[in-house]
Image: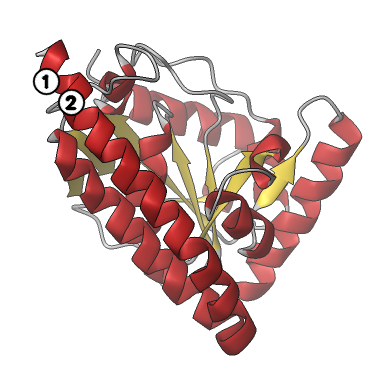
Amino acid sequence: MKTLSYFLSSIFAIVYFFFLLLFHPLQWLGLKIGGYKGHKLVVDCMNFVLMKSMLFVGISTKFSNPHKLPENTTLIFVSNHQSLFDISPIIWYFRKHHPKFVSKIELGRGIPSVSFNLRHGGAALINRKDSKQAITTLGKFAKKINKNKWSAVIFPEGTRSKDGKPKKFATNGLKMITKYNPDAYIVPLTINNSWKVFKYGNFPVGLFAPITITTHQPIKVNSLPFDELISQVETTIKQHINN
């Protein structure tokens, strides 16, 4: 199986990087011609293509959402984090809610398409070594998503789980976002199997690891005290992780 993985992973890597290169100038063009809407359309299409390109290594993505998500309001998607392949499905499946990520500042440079989108698409790029910068950036981000009725995506674990086992949630980022969005809804998400894509390391990728994303019941931010709210969200997410 690992021998086959080397072969298919080589093809996949070429295809995936090709699309990252292709959509970089298309994002620039979309932004210049169509502004925010033009750029978002390109980003949505890009993430659909990136998600489907994973079929080269037998990785499908199954999305389960039994709940009706509130519209015309800010949603705060809170999820466990297992790999970089968590990103594209979230952007595509929740595209009508305008998801914006809280990301580490290092990703804002050097990665075709990805860095451009983070810098120009409304993300919060935080420096985890500079608490003052992180707090200021998160405050501005929280106000912006509230004003535009966009949504936030945050991985409170801070870094991806390499074996699928959830890590302790950090709450400072969530506290800042909820502070400026008391009427928003938190939408817990559970991601499974994404970590298996990198079970051999960065290369080759693990074959035939179907990623699943499950949406849980939205919770109004101001319906519970913050500590109780976050405890409930963390418990809900972790209860549905398949170790």
Residue 70 seen in the figure: no
Q: Which residue is drawn at 21% across and 20% down?
A: 6
Q: How is the image coloured?
A: secondary structure
Q: Which amino acid does label 1 sit on?
A: Leu
- The part of the image, by quadrant, that contains residue 175 is top right
Q: Label 2 neighbourhood size at 10 Å, few (<14), some (14-19), many (20+)?
A: few
Q: Residue at x 64, y 29 (%)?
A: 171
Q: In this view, does 223 lie above or below 74?
A: above
Q: In this view, does 7 lie above or below 54?
A: above
Q: Label 1 neighbourhood size at 10 Å, few (<14), some (14-19), many (20+)?
A: few
Residue 133 at what x, y percent from top left?
Answer: 87, 40
Residue 3 at what x, y percent from top left?
Answer: 14, 14
Quarter that holds the C terminus: top left
In the picture of the structure, the residue carrying the numbered disc 1 is: 4
Quarter that holds the N terminus: top left
Number of disc labels: 2
Along the line of sight, which residue is nearer the eye, 86 or 55?
55
Residue 185 at what x, y percent from top left?
Answer: 49, 55
Q: Under tag 1, what secondary structure?
A: helix
Q: Distance between the residues labelled 1 and 2?
A: 5 Å
Residue placed furthest toward the bottom? 33
Q: Is residue 21 left or right of residue 2?
A: right
Residue 235 at what x, y percent from top left?
Answer: 39, 24
Q: Which residue is drawn at 65% across and 49% down?
A: 178
Asked if disc 1 and disc 2 are in contact, CB closer than 8 Å, the reply is: yes
- The part of the image, by quadrant, that contains residue 201 is top left
Q: Under tag 2, what secondary structure?
A: helix
Q: In this view, does 2 lie to the left or right of 114?
A: left
Along the line of sight, which residue is nearer the eye, 189 or 199?
199
In the picture of the structure, the residue carrying the numbered disc 2 is: 7
